[in-house]
Amino acid sequence: MTDAATYPPRPETTVNRDTLSRAALAWYDAGCAVIPIRLDGSKAPMIAWKTYQQHRATRDQTTRWFTAGRVAIAVVCGAVSGQLEMLELEGRAVAERTAARFVAELHTAGLGDLWHRLNFDGYAERTPSGGLHLLYRVDGGDVEGNTRLAARPATPEELERDPADKIKVWIETRGEGGYVIVAPSPAAAHPAGRPWVASAGSRPDRIPTITAGQRAALIGVARRLDRTPASPATPIRRRSRPSATRDEPPGEAFDRQVDWTELLTPAGWTLVRRSGRSRLWRRPGKTSGVSASTGYAADRDRLYVFSTSTPFAAHRPVSKFHFYATMFHGGDHVRAARALRDAGFGDQRRPAAS
């Protein structure tokens, strides 16, 4: 990997429509689901894109999107694009030398050839922030949702500028339920006003396929660079008496009895608006807008995340138990169930999960 990305002093802010259309079709022909993105700096889709998380648009529809107006290109990750995942080294990871440490750790772990294959022989691109996108497909395993792998706490100076942004991400993925804006998307699609630039030789048809084992090793090295505090202690108050009906598992009792405020607020989410039992929430690190809703389903109170910048797949229902296990027990649902049983949730006569 080279040092931080460099751009011309005055980067091109527009992309010829024919060039953009050809590029979008190149991504489509490489087996990717492609969607159009607004050119207002929001990085938001131009369309209602939920259906395209599971089904690719036709080639004709893709052509119409990218010849009809000023848009940027995004590729939907996950199964719809052939188990596609994107590993991102943020611009701050490059500037703070975390990216260099990541590459060094990969070589130490015997993964130098894998790094070369992803960064030099596959598809890589520089991001508007000066970071790096690496795209690859995973053979022999499903791609997980968007995942933060390595980050650090914000400094006092950073917190003074933005008290809500307590964690600064270094390395993360975009996976199932997420999307990534790709080159040659124009500068107007990003709030920094800089474009996405494909590395020399990078083309959509060169996206490599790696094994699930190689992915696990890659992700493991990234996780070792994480400098955030350990997961916060469980925010759930101990129940003083059994809270379940007969044979009710701890997770089901938890879903039934706990309010979303008990989970989302300790995890850094902000309540934006409420109407009856329905609520709108803003994710940690964001200062405006809405990122998720709760209480809208008539049968089950689920969290529906709109943002692709959380550990949860966008537009898919998330139970309270799954949120609790993900955020407070590292995704270990068995350990989460045991903790809830110890806190009085579920039929206390049931044996603990093993």
Image: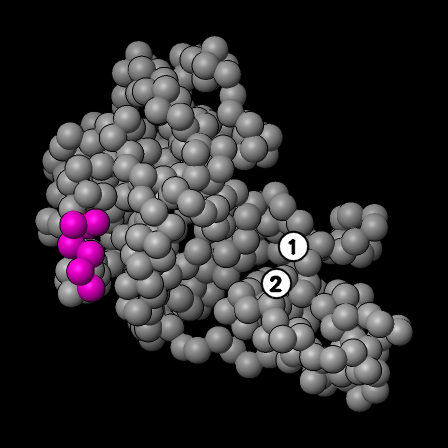
The amino acid sitting under disc 2 is Phe
Residue 52 point in image, percent of width and height: 54, 30
Pick whichever, 63 or 113, lies toward us: 113
Colouring method of the image = one colour
Q: Are marks 2 and 1 in contact (CB under 8 Å)?
A: yes
Where are the magenta residues, as a range? 109-115
Residue 4 visible to the viewer: no
Residue 125 figure quarter: top left
- Whether residue 186 is situated above or below residue 253 in the rendered picture: above
For the image shown, how many numbered marks are present on the structure?
2
Q: Please state if 180 lies on the left or on the right of 112 as rendered.
A: right
Farthest residue toward the bottom? 240
Instruction: Give percent across and percent down for residue 190.
Output: 35, 38
Q: Which mark is residue 175?
A: none
The residue singled out by tag 1 in the image is 318
- Pointer 2 local density, CA inside 10 Å: few below 14, some 14–19, many at least 20: many
| Residue 279 makes an appearance in the image | yes
Residue named by callout 2: 323
Q: Amino acid at mark 1?
A: Val
Question: Quick check: is 114 in the magenta stretch?
Answer: yes
Which mark is first along the chain, 1 or 2? 1
